[in-house]
Amino acid sequence: MKLSEILRKLKENPDDLSALGEAIAQAENLEEQTTTQTDQIGKLQENYRKAIQMIPVPGEEPKEEESEEEKMPTIEEAAAKIAEDLQN
């Protein structure tokens, strides 16, 4: 029986509370479903925001960072640094 039907019968005959337990169970189920759906909507919104941030905006391209090879010193630079550190 639908929750609305149970409530309608209860309104018609307030002395008959036999379906009240079923109405309470259905109301609790609806509350649980609402909470679950609200959580799912929040997760979807978060994923949507992350996906939108990944789309490049024309004119706002990030500057290219130096590659690993450019950050690493050459062998000569490393040897010079070690020699300098050993002298100190």
Image: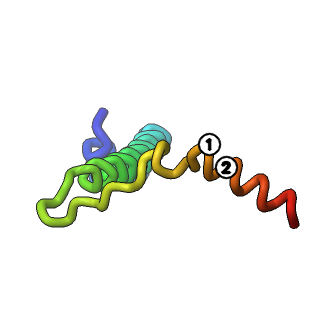
- Position of residue 77 relative to residue 22, above or below, is below
Nearer to me, 8 or 52: 52
Residue at 39% across, 55% down: 65
Residue 86 rendering spot, x and y as whole percentages:
86, 57
Residue at 28% across, 37% down: 2
Left or right of residue 69, residue 77 in this image: right
Please rate how many residues cluster around mark 1, counting C-alpha atoms within 10 Å: few if below 14, some from 14 to 19, many from 20: few
Nearer to me, 35 or 9: 35
Nearer to me, 22 or 67: 67
For label 2, the SS is helix
Q: Can residue 13 be seen in this view?
A: no
For label 1, the SS is helix
Residue 5 rendering spot, x and y as whole percentages:
26, 42
Count up the numbered dots.
Answer: 2
Tell me the distance, in whole angstroms, between the alpha carbons under discs 2 and 1: 5 Å
Q: Which amino acid does label 2 sit on?
A: Ala
Quarter occupied by residue 62: bottom left
Residue for badge 1: 75
- Position of residue 51 relative to residue 63, above or below, is above
Residue for badge 2: 78
Q: What residue type is labelled 1?
A: Ile
Q: Is residue 22 visible?
A: yes
Residue 28 rendering spot, x and y as whole percentages:
47, 46
Please rate how many residues cluster around mark 2, counting C-alpha atoms within 10 Å: few if below 14, some from 14 to 19, many from 20: few
Quadrant of image for the C terminus = bottom right
- Asked if the residue at tag 1 contacts the one at tag 2, i.e. Cβ–Cβ closer than 8 Å, the answer is yes
Left or right of residue 85, residue 53 in this image: left
Residue at 12% across, 60% down: 58
